[in-house]
Image (cartoon, rainbow, N blue to C red):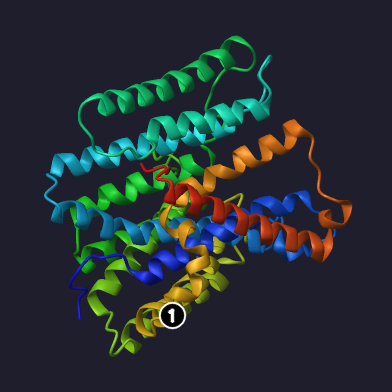
Amino acid sequence: MKIASLQRVASVDVLRALTMFLMLFVNDIPSLTNIPHWLEHAEMNEDMLGFSDTIFPAFLFCMGMSISFAIQNRYKKGDTHLQVVMHIFWRTVALVAMGLFSVNSGGVDGLSHAWFSILMVIGFFLTWGVYPKVEGKKKFLYTGMKITGVSLLTFLVLFKGMNGQPFEQKWWGILGLIGWTYAICALIYLFTRESLKWNAAVWLLFMGLVLLNHADALPLPFIPSDMTLHAFGMSGLLTSLLMQQYAQKERSGKFIAVLCALGIVMLIAAFVSHPFWIISKIQATPTWLFFCLAAFLPLFGFFYWLTDVKGKANWFDLMKPAGTATLTCYVIPYVWYSVQQLVGWHYPEVLTEGIPGLLKSALFSLVIVGITGLLVKAKVKLKV
């Protein structure tokens, strides 16, 4: 049974929320000592899949799943093809811009990293915040707030250029990498649409390009970011279309079996490629891609069964804001860490290592998700 309506899919929201929660967690644990090495990121030349190395690709996978639903909804609401293309363009611009700001927050004379980060996040909310649709004076007020946000971000670019290292593309930043993967996958989807055959063909093409690129047989310098990251996004997109084609709440076994079969294929590919490339997130190797997908595909099948089939999505209500206001959730720690630095607040030593430290990081992640929920209730939210 094809999904008849395009309301939010519980399993997609839940997996995205858990991924965002874990992203907050793994971003916090580098400050800890005496924690298991397998929880951390592997070094560049270390042949290991650390738990932290699976979170960013999981987010790209979740983002890829959201693309088909989001674009289909836009067409159902009456958007023209040009409007959809412009939405993809401006969303990409916003994500890439935010990514570049995040990697340019240091090296400024007269403006500390903490204050740069706080002003940066304020600029993000003013520029890309959700404003109510109103007329009259309030419309001018909200337009003025947006202009203030753009002016603030422009000031930060100019101030950094005149008082330190120039504002430059050192790397794209996490949000920037997400933005480029979103752009490429969304634009491809505009051509392939709901055709499972064509999307599967593009997915296979991406897998082949990943292998050729890392074998130095076909360099792809004209493609922004890394082909391996785009393959994660296309894998999520293909999964969402498989769901729309095969998912049945009454007979969920077929869809889940397809995902498990694909997971097995990816696991075999991982072992076959391992003699040629190490498992490395930093190098974005094919082996890393295949091992991650071998886990993500059946894992999503499990969450589909648990939430959409068995109706247990309410088990994850505590983390719901992380799945529906993900961008807001991601940027809040920039303010948290900056305020903590400015006031000189340090955790007790017992919370900086081992199990107590990990519990502190888990609690910190829940607090950030809770703050996100409060902001959403107050109608303060980023949306691009």
Residue that badge 1 annotates: 312
Question: How many callouts does the rendering have?
Answer: 1
Q: Is residue 41 left or right of residue 141?
A: right
**Residue 180 sits in quarter:** top left
Q: Is residue 301 left or right of residue 131?
A: right
> What residue is shown at x 54% (from left), y 71% (from top)?
272
- Could one spot residue 179 in this view of the protein? yes
Residue 42 in picture, x, y percent from top left: 70, 56
On screen, 4 above or below 227? Answer: below
> What residue is shown at x 34% (from left), y 59% (from top)?
66
Q: Residue furthest right?
A: 349
| Residue toward you, 80 or 54 | 80
Few, some or many residues within 10 Å of mark 1 (<14, 14–19, 20+): some
> What residue is shown at x 68% (from left), y 14% (from top)?
110
Q: Residue furthest front?
A: 137
Residue 164 in picture, x, y percent from top left: 65, 15
Residue 309 in picture, x, y percent from top left: 35, 83
Tell me the quadrant of the picture where the N terminus can be found: bottom left
Q: Is residue 323 left or right of residue 250?
A: right
On screen, 378 above or below 252? Answer: above
Q: Amino acid at mark 1?
A: Lys
| Residue toward you, 361 or 244 | 361
Tell me the quadrant of the picture where the C terminus can be found: top left
> What residue is shown at x 20% (from left), y 76% (from top)?
2
Residue 299 in picture, x, y percent from top left: 48, 75
Disc 1 element = loop
- Could one spot residue 211 in this view of the protein? no
